[in-house]
Amino acid sequence: MLSYLSTLPAFAAYFGFGVSFLAIFCTVHIWLTPQRELELIRHGNQAAAISLAGALLGFVAPLASAIAHSVSLPDLAVWGMVSLVVQWLAHVAMRLLIHDLAGQIESDNRAVAVLAAGVAVAVGVVNAAAMTS
C-alpha cells in the first residue's frame, strides 16, 4: 500500500509549484491591468469576473501541460514563466484590439469580456499544445 504513495513527494512539489505559479499569475495580472478586477467583482461586475476567469484558464492550460511534460522542477519553472509571458502578451494584444478595454470591463460590457476571455483561453490552449512539441 505504501508503494502507491512513493510519488507523493513529487506530486506535492509539482502541485505546490503549480499553485504558486497560479498565485503569481493572478497577482501580476491584477497588478498590471488598469481596472481593479477584484473590487469590480465584489460589486457584482460580471464582465470583470468573466475576463479574469478567462485569463486564469488561459494561463492554467499551458501550466498544466508544463506540469505534465516537464522533466524537473527547474524545467517547470521555465515553462511556467513562458506561460505567464505568453498570457500577458495575449492581454496586451486585446488592449490594442479593443479600445479602452479597461473601461469596457469597468462598465460591465460582457460581450467584450467574453471575447477577452475567449482569446485568453484560445491562446492558452495553443500555448499548451506548443509545449508538447
Image (cartoon, helix red, strand yellow):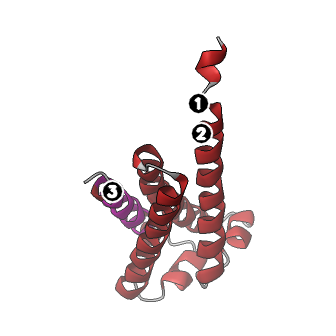
The residue nearer to you, when weighing 102 against 111, is 102
Image quarter for residue 31? Answer: bottom right
Type of amino acid at the residue the image marks with label 1: Thr
The disc placed on residue 24 is none
The residue nearer to you, when weighing 51 against 58, is 58
Name the residue: 73% across, 72% down: 39
The residue nearer to you, when weighing 63 against 49, is 63
Q: Secondary structure at mark 3?
A: loop
**Residue 82, position in %: x, y?**
43, 69
Magenta span: helix, strand or loop, mainly?
Answer: helix
What range of the chain is rendered magenta? Answer: 115-129
Name the residue: 46% across, 74% down: 85
The disc placed on residue 7 is 1
Picture quarter with the N terminus = top right
Residue 128's place in the image compared with 43, above or below, is above
Type of amino acid at the residue the image marks with label 3: Met
Is residue 11 among what the camera can see? yes
Q: Secondary structure at mark 1?
A: loop
Q: CA distance from mark 2 to mark 3?
A: 21 Å
Q: Dot 2, how many residues are within 10 Å of its Cα: few (below 14), some (14-19), or many (20+)? A: few
Q: Dot 3, how many residues are within 10 Å of its Cα: few (below 14), some (14-19), or many (20+)? A: some
Is residue 107 among what the camera can see? no
Mark 1 vs mark 3: in front:
1
Q: Which residue is mark 2?
A: 10
Name the residue: 66% across, 70% down: 27
State yes or no: residue 35 in magenta: no
Q: Which residue is mark 3?
A: 131
Picture quarter with the C terminus = bottom left
